Image (spheres, rainbow, N blue to C red):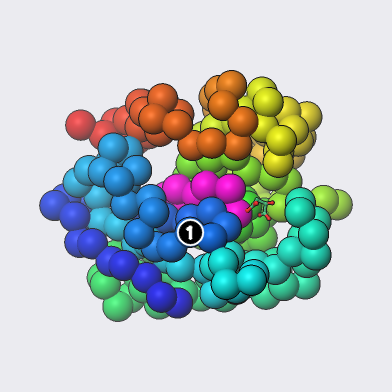
Amino acid sequence: MQHIFQKGTDPSKPTLVLLHGTGGTEHDLLPVAQIVSPESPVLSIRGNVLEHGMPRFFRRLSEGVFDEEDLIFRTNELNEFLNEAATNYELDRSNFIAVGYSNGANIAGSLLFHHKGSLRGAILHHPMVPRRGLKLPDLSGTPVFIGAGTNDPICAPQETEELQSLLTQADAHVTVHWEQHGHQLTHTEVHAAASWLQSQFNQG
Ligand code: MLT
């Protein structure tokens, strides 16, 4: 997959896996990584699907309606890519934390739903429920930050709560941060995610 790798200054910090929103690129979330964990290695990935020229991580049938078959295929593909990147860049595969926004948060959620141990933790900015009716793997010891909007037109608060409950039932430790700026990713939300990461992983 097309990506940017930055070695970071402290290889013991978690590797941040950056996953952009629809129409974004692997460049978009680099400033977010600088705020969230400036010393971390960074693996910033571009989605392999194009929707009218806009990169995404999986196909959708319409706004908010996912192509489940493609979602599963692309989630496997991303997980394989993370495995290969860990080998190629000599990274600790068990120390990857996803930072995803919107469509990128949705595929990060899908990694949690489908691949046990693929993420040590996740920062999900404005995620949806990636799939329903699935038995989730055991996510105990997996901290998840969800940034959500009380007035997000793409992800209603009830869907945020549904995702929180599905992850919690799988024993993930979920923290939800609410904003009132629709589907936007704001500075305050990114800073809340940074504080959360520090509290979870004792980042100095
Ligand atoms: C999706 O398709 O993943 C969601 O609708 C969010 C987005 O618009 O990217």
In this image, 6 relative to 112: left or right? left
Residue under the point 74% across and 64% down: 60
Residue 23's x, y, as percent? Answer: 54, 60
Residue 52's x, y, as percent? Answer: 64, 71
Residue under the point 35% across and 59% down: 27
In this image, 195 relative to 162: left or right? left
Q: What span is colored magenta in the figure?
A: 95-103
Kind of residue sitting beneath label 1: Gly
Q: How many marks?
A: 1
- For the C terminus, the quadrant is top left
In the rendered view, tell whether residue 194 sits above or below residue 110.
above
Residue under the point 77% across and 72% down: 69
Main SS type for the magenta part? strand
Q: Residue furthest left?
A: 9
* Residue 140 shows in this picture: no
In the rendered view, tell whether residue 116 sits above or below residue 150.
below
- For the N terminus, the quadrant is bottom left
* Residue 38 shows in this picture: yes
**Residue in front for this viewpoint, 92 or 80:** 80
Decide: few, some or many residues near mark 1? Use Cα within 10 Å; few <14, some 14-19, many ≥20.
some
Q: From the image, tell me which residue sits under label 1.
A: 24
| In the image, residue 69 lies in the stretch drawn in magenta | no
**Residue in front for this viewpoint, 114 or 185:** 185
**Residue in front for this viewpoint, 103 or 169:** 103
Secondary structure found at label 1 = loop
Q: Residue furthest right?
A: 133
Residue 133's x, y, as percent? Answer: 86, 52
**Residue in front for this viewpoint, 114 or 159:** 159
In this image, 117 relative to 13: left or right? right
Residue under the point 39% across and 30% down: 187
Residue 4's x, y, as percent? Answer: 31, 67
In this image, 65 relative to 176: left or right? right
